Image (cartoon, coloured by chain):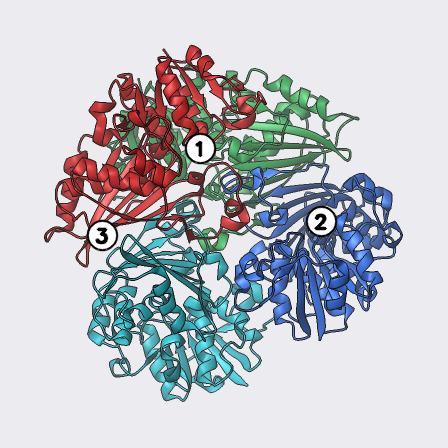
Chain colours: A green, B cyan, C red, D blue
Amino acid sequence: MIRVAILGATGYTARELLPLLLRHPEVEICALTTRQDTQSHVADVHPTVRGRLDLKLENLSLAEVAQRADCVFGCLPHGASAAAVKALLDAGCRVVDFSADYRLNDPQVYAKWYQVEHPDPERMPETVYGLPELYRESIRGAHLVANPGCYPTSAILALAPLLKAGTISPRGIVVDSKSGVSGAGRTPKPNLHFPECNENLSAYAVGQHRHTPEIDQVLSTWASVETQVVFTPHLIPMDRGILTTAYADPQAHVSTEQVLDVLRDQYRDEPFVRVVEDLPSTKHVVGTNFCDVTARVVQGKVLTISVIDNLLKGASGAAVQNFNLMYDFAETTALQ
Amino acid sequence: MIRVAILGATGYTARELLPLLLRHPEVEICALTTRQDTQSHVADVHPTVRGRLDLKLENLSLAEVAQRADCVFGCLPHGASAAAVKALLDAGCRVVDFSADYRLNDPQVYAKWYQVEHPDPERMPETVYGLPELYRESIRGAHLVANPGCYPTSAILALAPLLKAGTISPRGIVVDSKSGVSGAGRTPKPNLHFPECNENLSAYAVGQHRHTPEIDQVLSTWASVETQVVFTPHLIPMDRGILTTAYADPQAHVSTEQVLDVLRDQYRDEPFVRVVEDLPSTKHVVGTNFCDVTARVVQGKVLTISVIDNLLKGASGAAVQNFNLMYDFAETTALQ
Amino acid sequence: MIRVAILGATGYTARELLPLLLRHPEVEICALTTRQDTQSHVADVHPTVRGRLDLKLENLSLAEVAQRADCVFGCLPHGASAAAVKALLDAGCRVVDFSADYRLNDPQVYAKWYQVEHPDPERMPETVYGLPELYRESIRGAHLVANPGCYPTSAILALAPLLKAGTISPRGIVVDSKSGVSGAGRTPKPNLHFPECNENLSAYAVGQHRHTPEIDQVLSTWASVETQVVFTPHLIPMDRGILTTAYADPQAHVSTEQVLDVLRDQYRDEPFVRVVEDLPSTKHVVGTNFCDVTARVVQGKVLTISVIDNLLKGASGAAVQNFNLMYDFAETTALQ
Amino acid sequence: MIRVAILGATGYTARELLPLLLRHPEVEICALTTRQDTQSHVADVHPTVRGRLDLKLENLSLAEVAQRADCVFGCLPHGASAAAVKALLDAGCRVVDFSADYRLNDPQVYAKWYQVEHPDPERMPETVYGLPELYRESIRGAHLVANPGCYPTSAILALAPLLKAGTISPRGIVVDSKSGVSGAGRTPKPNLHFPECNENLSAYAVGQHRHTPEIDQVLSTWASVETQVVFTPHLIPMDRGILTTAYADPQAHVSTEQVLDVLRDQYRDEPFVRVVEDLPSTKHVVGTNFCDVTARVVQGKVLTISVIDNLLKGASGAAVQNFNLMYDFAETTALQ
């Protein structure tokens, strides 16, 4: 039985983690933290678990967390997370970190995009990026896993195999992503006010979204090529789901079927990636840990479409998948 | 040409007023106020009017407003509104007040429900309630009109004729209302955050909503009976529209057709009330100043269903209708 | 291991059953039927289960179904269902029937509301109504269970204890229900076309909805009083969830706390009913088998608010709960 | 006073035309046709105009239409439309054709994409494409105008000036469009059923959408270059609005400000195109005839974002704008 804590347990990623952990036969939830002093019952913050989990949210020190928990799911904001992770690892905990703090390898890239100095730069290059489809063996037994961003998960799963196989050119890749609003978090903001974003559609953070360097780094490292993607996120009036449409130039003439075969070869044995022939919809994967992906060749461009639930395969589902690998449980435990 | 100002021009009621006023052949918009010092251009606050109105939002004194405007649409919160209204009337302006401040006649009822002393209690009983279908003659030429609440408009238009005709009993009336989220205003709040209220449904302010005494007062006064309605508002995951289902006991045995006839008699010549036989939908009236209403007799209860656009017939459309009456313009000007 | 079949497996109730059954440790899904000859793979009809279930939808005879399955979940339309149920029971299967065919006890009431003669009238009065909170002991070991309607579940769970305790009068009860659109099924219709029902709100089937006699019968039978509810369903622009607001006259003066206590006493040990003090939202229960219920006394009326996921506690979740009771599995198996 | 008829008046484009025409001071609506024999009142088909227009939908012959009307708005499907247009023009009517029949110049391209022989091929190359921003002078006084497609309007207004100015390369342009569901028409279909497309997101008709050759033709003709765009439409769970994100390679190094200046130069005097610096949202233009457009240079790509209301600037608003030009009325009449 692994004793588990969630740091920063008031947001949507924690809300999604809870039912997965409650269903996990090898997990005992032992602490939920918040920085507020309210001592709210978890059921007041996440009413869906009322009657299923009798815990308070507590303003615990990291030492107290480390005393109670074997493994910590860190749902803190970037910057704050790294400081906590460092202390927890030193205290002997294992950590799945939802923040961006350990996803990037290069402290300077981090400082440029996140506009803060990284408090633990040495650990950045050695931390495994928690995408089991690319880095499963490094995740097994790891003490720290950097849980991937939601957009990067959808983009990388579609593009990485095509780059590695040399099917597409690393130059001029366009990643046009569309996300449900839960990806923006639980804090009310004017643009996320229901009457503003309902029945509305917009792009945001064009050319400036922090997932851009994450996509480039993982694609470039894994496929051993240098990419510089144009990444444009859009806000869609729905709760959850990401659909990413990516456009790339082929390295040589290629057919739709050949592109699909590259994806099929890569993902044949993956429990949570389904290469499909039809055009995937977010609703096919919402509520699951699946990524559905397809590809087409159109007017000489290679086009991929991939869908995930941004809160599951894009966050809490991936975290449990990583947790299962870290502790050598069956990878699909609690995820089906 | 009537020179018009809007007090508190950042919210949804102002946003809806602007295109109506821009379309009105006898109106010149001359001032938009805010309490912030930002001097934002109106197009930054309400992008829909970009290119159509070249005005800044200004933190004007009431004296400045009175100097520029003949008529003021007051979109301030209750309490703040009455203070401004008083000064504007004294300065010779006419006012359509969107706040609740002059809807109630009784300062004590106001103090109980709004938990603040009214700054201008003498004017309360003499101010006309701006529902033209009940009080058209008093609105003509008025200097101050209290623009009705959105829920009361939907409930009163359905129930008032039936009460006056003695069709239904004043005892035990249930008013079950459902509203789109724009009715809650433009200020972001946790329960109005998109991922919280999208795909969600809840009742709120049960037994405590401030529109309750407004409904009771207008029904009771106009029909000369004493009502005490049970009013329950619900929040519906859509932008705009109110549907009110009301249930009452008949005074004597009555048929659906007889109830409809009472409504038809009342509203035969009304430009903005349509008595319909089919069940009305909010989408039939959204974007218009119409109220559609029907009735049924079911299991011995009289049931009415009425729909309005909460931001038009329930707010800004009604305000323009009142304005037209105050200045003796054709009542439908700018509303079709 | 119980071998399970689903009759009429193309709709939403079947889609919701599948992941529950896949998660159930004592279930093997052995047949999915359709009346079409298409032999579609289940993943083409329900893409969410792609990769998790490798079965075709087949146009099987009832004899073939009975040969393969121990227990059948019947998702056929009323009328068609009873004919199938009869044959399956005769062939030794157990059945959870989602249709309305065995919910009503009285063939004449059935004929009046469903406008068809019942093909198996003898079995009507003896079939247990599958609401475990009222009829748990009769469901245990049953061979046929009539799975309740979604609206009745939400209304009965709120009102039955108050009627039985004599808290509320059986006369003049108003049941004002609001439902997400999935309750209307998977067949495209003009009023369910996205641009018609999105951002729209309407009542439907006023005074004529077939769940009316079901609510009356169960309330009347269980509480030994005669009710005649006024039931008004409304269509809400969201996928799933029902919120029912009910209004009743108290038998004697009563407080909110006293009404809540009656509900608490009834449901203290129920795994899937949560009596709450705050106002419940559908989002608190969507995706779960819970019913959250609260009550208030307002202006002399007793008001209850209850919420369920119409496809889970209102359909497929209840069916699995009934299945667990029929086979003596832990009642919450596969439901958490 | 121009007597106006609408052919095929049951759909969404007709529904949107009606309030515009009712507001137009020089228009009298004299006929609404349908192919059904039902003689429905227009208020039963379009309840929003109840009480404002007292006309039946009639199954009229084209001769009858020509007798009643000076100008016909044709809302028939492609193929059927050309046959009607031909007859109406011969009978002396002017026509604004919403169908695709006269948008393309080349009968063979038409036959390939629409899989039907064009019944009136001679008129194809000489018909003006009704985008006033490009072809205003040819629209003035025209007897037939081909009203543009919704996606092409959004894409062309953003890209045409940049192509003509030589800012972007005609090769490898990606047009990634997102549309509300009303663009798919009023006929119920499984994928447009509310519970299917609500809270869902998908691409459709990838590489095969019929607006592709329309975009290529208009861009190529107007800018005198040969384009071959990759066009990908996506279905967004909202009623109305299109946002198009386009990606192109610059011909030479260029800044965001320089790209914006090209757009500003082109649209300085346009009544319905607003070049904006912020990122536009569909909600800024829904309910209006505006197109808002902006541009950015990101990672060496030129990116444009343009938004329209697909039913107004993308259909019925554009039709009225064209009508105004054809009859020499002020271009903005009835559109503000």
Query: Element type at marker 3?
Result: loop
Q: Are marks 1 and 2 in contact (CB under 8 Å)?
A: no
Q: Which amino acid does label 3 sit on?
A: Gly
Q: Do the residues labelled 1 and 3 touch (CB within 8 Å)?
A: no
In terms of depth relative to the viewer, which is nearer, D170 or B300?
Answer: B300
Q: Find residue D125 and report its horizontal and vertical position in percent.
A: 87, 53
- Which chain is indicated by disc 3? C
Q: Specify whether residue A87 is in view.
A: no
Q: How many labels does the image show?
A: 3
Q: Find residue A132 and report its horizontal and vertical position in percent.
A: 52, 21
Q: Residue B188 carries which label?
A: none
Spatial separation of the CA atoms under disc 1 and disc 3: 54 Å
Q: What residue type is labelled 1?
A: Phe
List the single residue furthest toward the left.
C252
- Which residue lies under the disc numbered 3? C172
Spatial separation of the CA atoms under disc 2 and disc 3: 52 Å
Q: Which mark is residue D77?
A: 2
- Which chain is indicated by disc 2? D
In terms of depth relative to the viewer, which is nearer, C165 or C200?
Answer: C165
Q: Which amino acid does label 2 sit on?
A: Pro
- Which chain is indicated by disc 1? A
Query: Element type at marker 2?
Result: loop
Labels 1, 3: one chain? no
Label 1: how many Cα within 10 Å (few below 14, some 14–19, many 20+): many
